Amino acid sequence: MFTQMRIRGVGVIDDAVLELSPGLNVVTGETGAGKTMVVSGLGLLLGERADSGLVRTGRESASVEGVLELASTHPALARADEAGAEHDDGELVVARTLTAAGRSRAHVGGRTAPVGVLADLGRLLVAVHGQADQWRLKQGDAHREVLDDYAGSDVLTLRERVRTSYDGWRTLKAEHEALVAQARERARDIDALTASLEEIEAVDPQPAEDVALRAEDERLAHADTLRLAAAGALELLSGDDLAGESRADVRELLAGARAALAPGTEHDEQLRQLDERLHEVGTLVTELAADLSAYVTDVELDPGRLEFVQQRRATLAGLTRKYGDTVDEVLEWSGRAAARLDGLVTADGSVDALGDRVGTAEAELGEAVAALSQARSEAARHFGDDVCAELAHLSMGRAQVVVEVRPRLDPDGVACPDGSRVRVSPTGADDVEILMAANPGASPRSIARSASGGELSRVMLALEVVGAARGGADGPPTFVFDEVDAGVGGRAAVDVGARLARLARQSQVIVVTHLAQVAAFADRHLVVHKSDDGAVTSSDVTVVDGDERLRELSRMMGGDPDSDAGLAHARDLLAQAAQTATEAGALSTKATKATKATTSGRATATRAAGRATGTKRAGGRAVRVAGA
């Protein structure tokens, strides 16, 4: 709970400290004194969006600090630890500053932190309700949230199961639809790849075949030239021309040269080396002549072979124009194409397999949706009774509240076990609407059309009290009500105060009110004072008790704060509030026992319903009614 909040430079508030207590804290004051700024400052502290217009005129910045006392096991303390905050035995200090230029900074436990950390803490610690929240109750989605929170952790567990199933089903369905949509393009690709691979297979190119054929083509096309060139060289080396005539050749000349050297080789080493070199040259010439002779013999004129080679080269060129610059590149492309073709062909099987998975996921989603709808319907049957019972304590005993849970039927939707088809969202397949008939015999209508502002305020308060009664130790956090009693007066205002006091038995409640009947129930009464020196308006907040509290109540009832009649009326009001609170406490004890018994019975029924639809309920922790 909050034990203290300090506000500086927010709106008309210059510097004010709110000393808060457990139970019901009531904030009152004259119109324009700055009561709403208390709620605005608290909003800043809870991570709401900063508005530089909140900074007090003439100030460069505004700041709000709050001191919290938390149990060591509270999740908010764990979240603060994650942000590196320091705390003393569960006492945590949070702060927010806002400059006139619009810059904002947050601190948690003495450490700078993102504003989002304050928002996380706020969701765990405080529920703020104002006129805007009442109007949000007129939106359909808010009705479903109210029912789910009322139903408790069992429905929330089922809803989480639906959300998980829905996400998985949507992912698989999107993948399947994408594959089906690509089927025509995939068929075209299969045909094209098949034709290309068949074309390559028909030609059957071999690695580096184009290089070998190019060389052979060049040789065959110039066979005459090659044969004549080799024969001419052979004639000069061997002395035999093509006609068979003999002449002096290189070999004879080399032999003559060696014969000329022979007389001197015995007398000089250098000359012997020269003779050996002549011998080597002669050997090389002989081998070269043999090779030339063989070449001349091998070079043949073969027009048929030349035609085949040139035709083969033309065929290969047809492939290289389409699939690669060389035959080797064509073969590489062929390997890749074959692999891709295999993937495309097997994709048809993947479509069927994925379709089966989509069907399985849809069946699981249908079961989860049906279980959630049944649990909601079960909770809805009791929801109206509980709220009506609470409204009877708020001077609305003739009102009837009914909760309708309607499935969103859709012939193209998800199939449920009973054969129906529904349109599913992450929160299920139900439209929920809270209906109210203000008087017996009247047809229930949506709260948006049947409830006035004051009635809607009391309905919302009834929701909070019912939620708190079901929540027990794990119930709601601190509640903040900003003039939730708007449009309420007379005996109804006393009833509102009594129900707020009842809610405050289980949670800290902070109420900004203009009604003395509500303020009379306060465990701590804080008054926002306004002073005007003609130049600057400032506000301060003080705790009032005793005679000061009587004077404030007298002022709120429209009388002279110091008149004997006004003070007497205030004393009567306090006495009446005390007696009402005592009577409500006794009734509350009985009602709490009855509620726990009823809740246990409903939990058993819902668990049975869950088993009937293949579901299993989690633990029995109830969750607070958010109200909006």
Image (cartoon, rainbow, N blue to C red):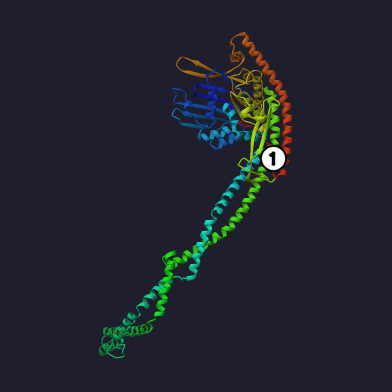
* Whether residue 355 can be seen here: yes
The image shows residue 606, relative to residue 306, as above or below, that is: above
User: Picture coordinates of residue 409 (x, y %)?
Assistant: 64, 42
User: Residue at the spot x=61%, y=55% of the render?
Assistant: 353
The image shows residue 430, relative to residue 541, as above or below, that is: below
Q: Report which quarter residue 372 is drawn in.
A: top right
User: Residue at the spot x=68%, y=16% of the render?
Assistant: 576
Q: Amino acid at mark 1?
A: Gln
Residue in front for this viewpoint, 581 or 381: 381
Looking at the rendering, in which quadrant would you find the C terminus?
A: top right
Q: Is residue 605 left or right of residue 497?
A: right
Residue in front for this viewpoint, 606 or 347: 347
Label 1 secondary element: helix
Q: Is residue 239 left or right of residue 309?
A: left
User: Picture coordinates of residue 349 (x, y %)?
Assistant: 59, 58
Q: Is residue 405 left or right of residue 282?
A: right
Residue furthest out toward the top = 564
Crowdedness near tag 1: few (<14), some (14–19) or many (≥20) residues, C-alpha within 10 Å:
some
Q: Report which quarter residue 478 is drawn in.
A: top right
Looking at the rendering, in which quadrant would you find the N terminus?
A: top right
How many marks are shown on the rendered structure? 1
* Whether residue 152 can be seen here: no
User: Picture coordinates of residue 246 (x, y %)?
Assistant: 29, 91
User: Residue at the spot x=67%, y=15% of the render?
Assistant: 575
Q: Report which quarter residue 212 is drawn in.
A: bottom left
The image shows residue 73, relative to residue 220, as above or below, that is: above
User: Picture coordinates of residue 188 (x, y %)?
Assistant: 51, 59
Label 1 belongs to which residue?
Answer: 374
Residue in front for this viewpoint, 157 or 224: 224
